[in-house]
Amino acid sequence: MSEENKTETENEVEGKGEKKGGRRPQRAPKQEKKPAQDGMNPDLEERVVAVNRVAKVVKGGRRFSFAALIVVGDKNGKVGYGLGKAKEVPDAIRKAGMKASKRMIKVSIENGTIPHEVLGLFGAGEGTGIKAAGACRSILELAGVKNVLTKSVRGSNPHNIVKATFKALKNLRSLDEVATVRGVNTKGLRMKAKATKA
């Protein structure tokens, strides 16, 4: 190549670089990768309520996967449930545990039992223990309830029992909450409750 051709090609290259904006922008510094966490609080206790194997029929045969229903709680009035699906059981349980810890609810508890009657759940005296079976028992234990009587109406599907129990626990209100909503003193409400029992 002659001198003229070299200078022309260099000018073209420089011209192209100017069109693009010159130098490349600097990249942001790389951040250190943090170890993956399960997202579970170490104070929470988890219980496996049900593990179900499901099959999807495809051209080559059946594809199996697992669905796990998990309940987590701190035994101090907070409890949650989650459903996780995966190809392996441990992965399904891990996913369900993470979902459960994110979807926790606060349960009103007075003297180790629930404050009032709710559909399917009844307050119980000291020493009664937890009179419940299956999924309902796990939820109440992890919520921190010590004395309660339960009655499951109709089906025994663990998914439906978990959802029904959570719906009932969400409807619970403590005496203080009722008093603030009504705008009255809690002493008056307690006296009325004792008078109706007598």
Image (cartoon, rainbow, N blue to C red):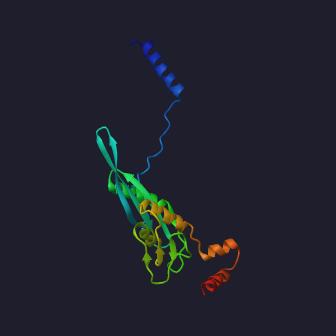
Task: Give the vertical position of 32 relative to 126 (above or below).
Answer: above
Q: Give the image quarter of residue 133.
A: bottom left
Q: How many marks?
A: 0
> Quick check: 4 above or below 61?
above
13 on left or right of 195: left
Residue 151's x, y, as percent?
A: 47, 71
- Residue 131 position, x and y percent, is 43, 76
Q: Residue at x 35, y 58 (%)?
A: 51
In terms of image quadrants, where is residue 95? Answer: bottom left
Judge by depth and name the residue closer to the eye, 62 or 151. Answer: 151
Quadrant for residue 52, please give it: bottom left
Q: Position of residue 54 (x, y in %)?
A: 35, 51
Give the side of residue 93 with respect to residue 182, left or right: left
Residue lying farthest to the right in this orientation: 183
Image quadrant for the N terminus? Answer: top left
* Quadrant into which the C terminus falls: bottom right
**Position above or below: 34 against 2:** below
Q: Nearer the viewer, residue 26 or 107?
A: 107
Residue 43 in sight in this render: no
Whether residue 39 is situated above or below residue 120 in the rendered picture: above
The residue drawn where x is 45% and y is 81% is 128
Residue depicted at x 47% and y 73%: 150
